[in-house]
Amino acid sequence: MENPRFEGKRRVLDSELTTQAAISENVLLFDESYGLGKDLLGGKGHGLVEMTHAGLPVPPGITITTRVCNDYYSNGQRFPKDLMDKVMIKIAKIEERTGKEFGKSLLVSVRSGAPLSMPGMMDTILNLGLNDEVMQFLISSTNNQRFAYDVYRRFIQMYGKIVAQIDGKEFEELIDKKKSARHIKQDVELTAEDLKELVLEFKKLYKEKSGKEFPSNPEEQLRSAIEAVLLSWNGKRAKEYRRFYKIDDSMGTAVNIVAMVFGNFGDSSGSGVGFTRNPSTGEAKLYAEFLANAQGEDVVSGARTPFQIEEIHERFPDLYAQLEKIADNLENHYKDMQDFEFTVENGKLWMLQTRTGKRTAQAAVKIAIDLVKDGLISEEEAILRVEPSQLDQLLHKHIDPAAKVNPVVRGIAASPGAAIGKATFDTNRAAELGNKGEKVILVRRETAPEDIHGLIASEGVLTQRGGKTCHAAVVARGMGKPAVVGAEQLSIMDGQAKVGETVIKEGDVITIDGGTGDVILGRAPLVDAEISADLDTFLSWADKVKTNGVWANADTPTMVNNAIKFGAEGFGLVRTERMFNAPERLPFVQRLIISESPEERKKWLDKLKEFQAKDFYDIFTAAKGRPVVIRLLDLPQHEFLHAAASPELAEPIRKKLPSLKEDNPMLGHRGSRLAITWPEIYEMQSQAISDAKSKVESEGVKVKEEIMLPLTVHKNEMSRLRALIEKILPNSPIGTMIETPRAALTSGEIAEFADFFSFGTNDLTQMTFGVSRDDAEGKFLIKYVEKKVLPVNPFETVDKDGVGRLMKISAEEGRKTNPNLEIGICGEHGGDPESIEFFVNEVGVNYTSCSPFRVPVARLASAHAALKRRSESKERKYSSTL
């Protein structure tokens, strides 16, 4: 199934895919792999191959293709018999190129690499190939005992955690104990003797937990590490990440084996992460972080706070100049912002990774616009660079700039937007509360990939450690969640955070501002986002491409105004029942329902008509000539009788309720059925619409009203109610919502009396599946998705095979009867990107309608759908000429 969140990336990826006949080999050196795609090499391998081909300084290495991963799982997780033979043949080639021998002086890293970026979600092992004998050679050849023991303890720690599945905290506790005994704070302050002792303690821990001695055979180590990386494809955090981003489980991961270069060699060495542009703002400026005397894991884990780009420029000017040049080369080659990793070994720069960088929505839009201005990509390519769902981030609330707030601490602003929630210090607790609907902020010393389920469920994340490229920052940006990292004045331990005399306890409400780095006790006042100039420009490009209208659901003038601000071209659903629930109207509605005669009902309807006429006047005025689809009253009568609006109504309502009781009110006397038995209600509403239209047009504003009948299931309902309305509104288009399977299947008959159809996809989904949405989501639907009984929640993304098939039948048969039939969507699916693609390209709707704040998302999703259809049409034409 295609993935809507990665649709743009997938289109870029498609151009890099490997042809079926291109190659059959599954173990390849980097310089043997040029021209192969990410589908085989994975993103990391593909980047290393491209950089090698471009002549950038990349250590030699091997990629094991994704086919091996897929074969491994299809064969019951059996390790391929001949794989190690092939790997060792390629290792010999690396030995020739480096002048080093594996099992003596050549150490390697073993890294994952999926076709689509999954930062930190799978496993990596560094410094592989070490044993006691190799250690002695390393000490004598480098004359650096501290370096050698630091490399060894790191290897045992990573191997033990990933291969032997020993809790990583147990290794960290031994390190903390050692630092405490020495009265030091940083790992870099540990001496060679300290690290030598840690190696022995780590080996002892390994044996206690695994029941085996730590393996000394480098080839055995390599085989186990390769299998651990393959297994990590189906690890808990990887599956959580794929489920959140809707990434296909069948892609698999490649495995990359790369000659080690060492950033922990001393003060002239280090490791870093960079972006060719700012991933938070999109600013066209190198953005990087660097830790001296460190390996890459130290940077991304957030265990130490690295130098920022300004400090790199000042302290390491030669390195900065090299990084700037490489960043320019990478961006010109890939024509997109790149995220890269690098290591400096004794002053020499090595590139270890490049990939399309995760970015905020704000950055995505700005980068796309700037790349068009720079002549690197077209407007249409720019449209595909931004995922529709990302635009939700741009509509996040932020702290009111006029409000006086007193931050208790300021950290590093790592991912924009403001979030309010209960401080929660345990990842599992955050996931539990967040999945129950509570607003939580995950607060940690630093996050690790294992925290992914807590991050997904939280409103935002706050960490004591880390920089702008640490795990928490990268993942939060990708998810569009606010993040404040590196708040080093905080002391987080024992389920609370302290800064000075202030204590933040579990459950305390805090506000974090990912745009400023501020952390505020309590709830700060938030304000809605505005459409920026960049977003306005970008969406204007999308509007030029899309072929369908994007309308909004709006019941009040405020909603209408908001929708227009976000670019709505019309209003596909104006619900009238909500207007009846207003406190000043409810007494009249209740008196109407308990009335015993048509004359008495008319008396109260006349009162309500005055309110309705004002409602429609306000909406028509606000709409400023845009189409307005008014759905006539739909709710069951009992919905208005929960409590008496005044004391004198209590007894009459009590007497009336038994006669209105229904076993299943939502399938009972409501919608068009109510109008067939009480036609005077729709007569009143039609007259109110007519009166409002006359008044608005007398003031010089054009009105384009359309009348929608709810819950029509038979052509006779449609014909009778159309005749009723036409007596009052003879020139108004009249249509119906298609909400039931019967209406969809008999659309050819209903279309005889309809000018338009609008699919009410929420009710159509309920009735097709035979479930109540609230009950299903609360009881079993989420489990159905987790267990893959259903691919997605059908109330979030339309069920194409069932509900979608009914929609296609309805549209086809309706247009056979009435070729001019207009078709729209007014359910919540009208704002879901994947559903929009289906509605536009397969159902052939004229417009989609969604909530006002989803309008920008729908505009971009509609453009994506149009471009996909255009691309597929070109491919069909090309294929037909072969």
Image (cartoon, rainbow, N blue to C red):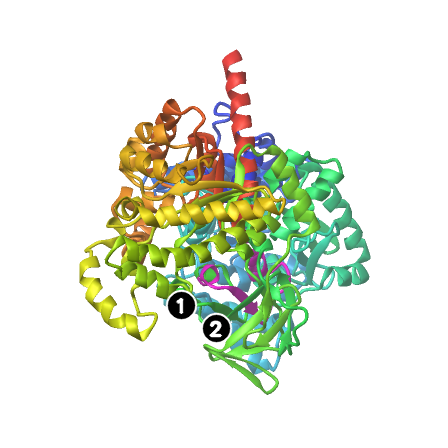
Q: Position of residue 483 (x, y in %)?
A: 58, 64
Image height of 762 relative to 397, above or below: above
Q: Which residues are magenta?
A: 454-479
Q: Quadrant of residue 609?
A: bottom left
- Report whether residue 17 is seen: no
Magenta segment includes 618: no
Give the number of the disc on residue 422.
Answer: 2
Q: Which mark is residue 319?
A: none
C-beta proximity under 8 Å, tags 2 and 1? yes
Which x, y percent locates residue 78? 34, 42
Q: Which kind of residue does numbered mark 1 sit on? A: Leu
The residue that label 1 is drawn on is 433
What residue sits 29% from the left and 70% below the top? 649
Foreground residue, 386 or 723?
723
> Tag 1, which secondary structure?
helix
Nearer-the-camera pick, 569 or 531? 569
Q: Judge the density around disc 1: few (<14), some (14-19), many (≥20) Cα neighbours within 10 Å.
A: some
Residue 500 seen:
yes
Image location of residue 62, percent across then percent down? 55, 40
Which residue occupies 65% across, 65% down?
Answer: 413
Query: Disc 2 on helix, strand or loop?
Result: strand
